[in-house]
Amino acid sequence: MADDPKAHGVATRLSHAGRAGTHVHGFVNPAVHRGSTVLFPNVAARKEGAKHRFEQFMTYGTQGGPTHYAFEDVIAEIEGGTRCLVVGTGLAAVAVPLLAYLKAGDHCLMPDNAYGPARNLCEGLLKGFGIATTYYDPTVDEGAMAALIQPNTKVVYTESPGSHTFEVQDIPAIARAAHARGAKVLMDNTWGIHHFMPFQHGVDVSIQALTKYVGGHSDILLGSVTVNDEADWQVVRAAGSQLGQFASPDDVWLALRGVRTMLVRLKRQEASGIEVAKWLETQPQVLRVLHPALPSHPQHEIFKRDFTGACSLFGLVLQPHYTPEDAARFIDSLQLFGIGASWGGFESLAIPTTGHITRTAGTGDFGGPMVRIHIGLEEPADLIADLTQGLAKLG
């Protein structure tokens, strides 16, 4: 094997990162370390440890422990960053960097297709703190983004693709405009996982809901905040500490186990998702399919340029003569698709999105009622058969 671990393929790095090594005596997987109190041999050692509280297992359980550190190393590997903070939920991973970089009087730019709870945070706590948010068309180009940036804009938030309507953003162009005016670029990279390398495209802080594909089994809640710069690390890590953000070591251990098989699961789900999406495009009841990997997607060329693959979450738009009630009837008829808000697990899901998303920048008209589909590990032929009978009920 090559001497430089970065020279290895992603599958190899996901198998080996966060482990003691191969030529060691002991179990393959790191143990679960639970604890609150950290003991020191003397007062001087405790005082010295306080100087390095973000660096190692030195002060208190809320700063993490060996299980956390091993897992954070793996997530940093996935995204090509240097430092990672694991937190209790995906929404916590959104909140920590926003609160780290924004203060009263500041301005934030948020894409109009952003994850609903992120939007709620802007309209709730951030507005209450005196932080203003402007929502922008996610397909904005560099010039239009530059025009949106105000003197007090400190954060340009991105989510690509959007997890409900799947617009792909031109992240390098947005980052150039933001950095020219001194703003930080935050990105929700949950859909991209390892297919999009945020720090190679100008992102300062990458956010993921590890609840999804990393966990993979719909039984944990976790989020991550990853950076590639020491100054950003100090800002983000301090905010996480001040907010008391902490992830259960048991959930972290489950995610550490789940991530070892993520690439295999993701490849299967990617292929199945594209197969089902292509089939849906041929169905008369369907107006369009919102999947960035399909040539029909409006930002497919940006997707091909910036992403190395896709996950298995996408949307479909029914023909305009159907109603939201028809979409609900279609979903209710499905036998192999659960009706649930998450995604990235082994199970297929379907939910209506029309009427469940907020848009204020004029980007919400897709021509018909929308359904979001997540493809799990079932046989694609079985899922297609289920969708066939469901669409047939629409007439």
Image (cartoon, rainbow, N blue to C red):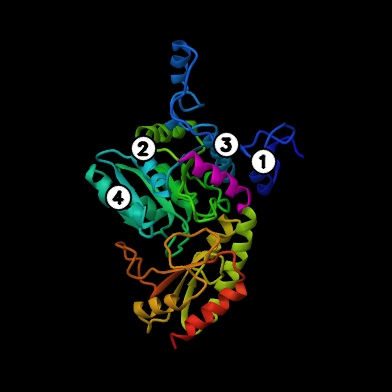
Of the residues under marks 2 and 1, which one precedes in the sequence? 1
Residue drawn at x 48%, y 23% is 58
Amino acid type at circle 4 is Cys
Residue 90: percent from left, percent from top = 43, 49
Of the residues under marks 4 and 2, which one precedes in the sequence? 2
**Corner quadrant of residue 235:** top left
Q: How much space separates mark 4 and mark 2, taking CA atoms?
A: 14 Å
Q: Nearer the viewer, mark 2 or mark 1?
A: 1
Of the residues under marks 3 and 2, which one precedes in the sequence? 3
Residue ID for mark 2: 100
Q: How much space separates mark 2 and mark 1, taking CA atoms?
A: 32 Å
Residue ID for mark 1: 16
Residue ID for mark 4: 122
Dot 3: what SS? helix
Magenta segment includes 319:
no
* Res 183 seen here: no
Q: Nearer the viewer, mark 1 or mark 4?
A: 1
Residue 369: percent from left, percent from top = 38, 75
Residue drawn at x 53%, y 44% is 199
Mark 2 is surrounded, within 10 Å at the Cα level, by few (under 14), some (14 to 19) or many (20 or more) other residues, namely some
Of the residues under marks 3 and 1, which one precedes in the sequence? 1
Amino acid type at circle 2 is Ala
Residue drawn at x 43%, y 15% is 47
Q: How much space separates mark 1 and mark 4, taking CA atoms?
A: 38 Å
The segment highlighted magenta reads: 248-262
Of the residues under marks 4 and 3, which one precedes in the sequence? 3
Amino acid type at circle 3 is Ala
Residue ID for mark 3: 70
For the N terminus, give its image quadrant: top right
